[in-house]
């Protein structure tokens, strides 16, 4: 009987400790998405589909996309038309990182002097977008 009580107490303590650590330890969890600008999104989506086996054949208003599941979470690839007026050498990749605690993580980024170029919310979560030193967009995504 006492072994059962001790075992139960250890389980409860471990569960509470794990839950507290999870909430109070904001960190990047995985790459959730990469977006690539392309002069010919249809051809590039075909290349990723045919050559790499990544189905990027879904299309919406000229944007091609696809996804697959990983152990950490879903990975999404989007191929977008190059924006009108974009100059040669304009960064063409955007990376989205999923985080465990959006508010804490973005508060930490702000404390380091990082200012978002855009903040958005939708049905899939909250987004905090900034640019790296080369001008590539980096988005932090969480709930």
Image: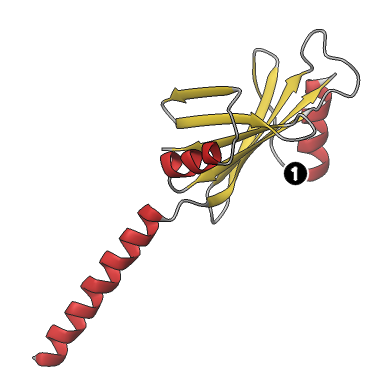
Determine the image quadrant of residue 75. Answer: top right
Tell me: residue 116, above or below residue 107. Answer: above
**In this view of the protein, which residue sits in the foreground, 142 or 1?**
142
In the rendered image, the residue lying farthest to the left is: 1
Q: Residues within 10 Å of mark 1 (few under 14, many from 20)?
A: few
Horizontally, residue 51 falls left or right of residue 2, namely right
Tell me: residue 12, above or below residue 20. Answer: below
Horizontally, residue 77 falls left or right of residue 88, namely left
Across and down, in percent, residue 109 comes to 55, 40
In the rendered image, the residue lying farthest to the top is: 85
Q: How is the image coloured?
A: secondary structure
State the quadrant of the C terminus.
Answer: top left
Across and down, in percent, residue 90 comes to 84, 23
Tell me: residue 72, above or below residue 53. Answer: below
Across and down, in percent, residue 128 comes to 54, 31
Q: How many marks?
A: 1
Q: Considering the numbered disc 1 on the image, is that residue within a helix, a strand or a loop?
A: loop
Tell me: residue 19, above or below residue 31. Answer: below
In the rendered image, the residue lying farthest to the bottom is: 2
**In this view of the protein, which residue sits in the foreground, 53 or 81?**
81
Q: Residue at x 80, y 33 (%)?
A: 134
State the quadrant of the N terminus.
Answer: bottom left
What residue would you read off at disc 1?
Answer: 53
Across and down, in percent, residue 137 comes to 69, 30
Q: Residue at x 21, y 71 (%)?
A: 12
Horizontally, residue 53 falls left or right of residue 76, namely right
């Amino acid at each position: 009987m006492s072994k059962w009580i001790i075992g139960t107490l250890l389980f409860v303590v471990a569960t509470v400790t794990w839950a507290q650590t999870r909430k109070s330890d904001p960190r990047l969890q995985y790459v959730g998405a990469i977006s690539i600008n392309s002069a010919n999104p249809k051809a590039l989506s075909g290349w990723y589909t045919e050559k790499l086996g990544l189905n990027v054949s879904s299309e919406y208003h000229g944007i091609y996309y696809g996804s697959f599941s990983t152990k950490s979470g879903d990975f999404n690839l989007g191929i977008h038309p190059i924006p009108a007026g974009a100059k040669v050498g304009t960064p063409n990749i955007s990376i989205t990182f999923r985080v465990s605690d959006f508010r804490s993580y973005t508060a930490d980024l702000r404390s380091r002097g990082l200012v978002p170029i855009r903040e958005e919310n939708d049905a899939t979560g909250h987004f905090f977008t900034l640019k790296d030193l080369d001008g590539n967009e980096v988005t932090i995504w969480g709930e």
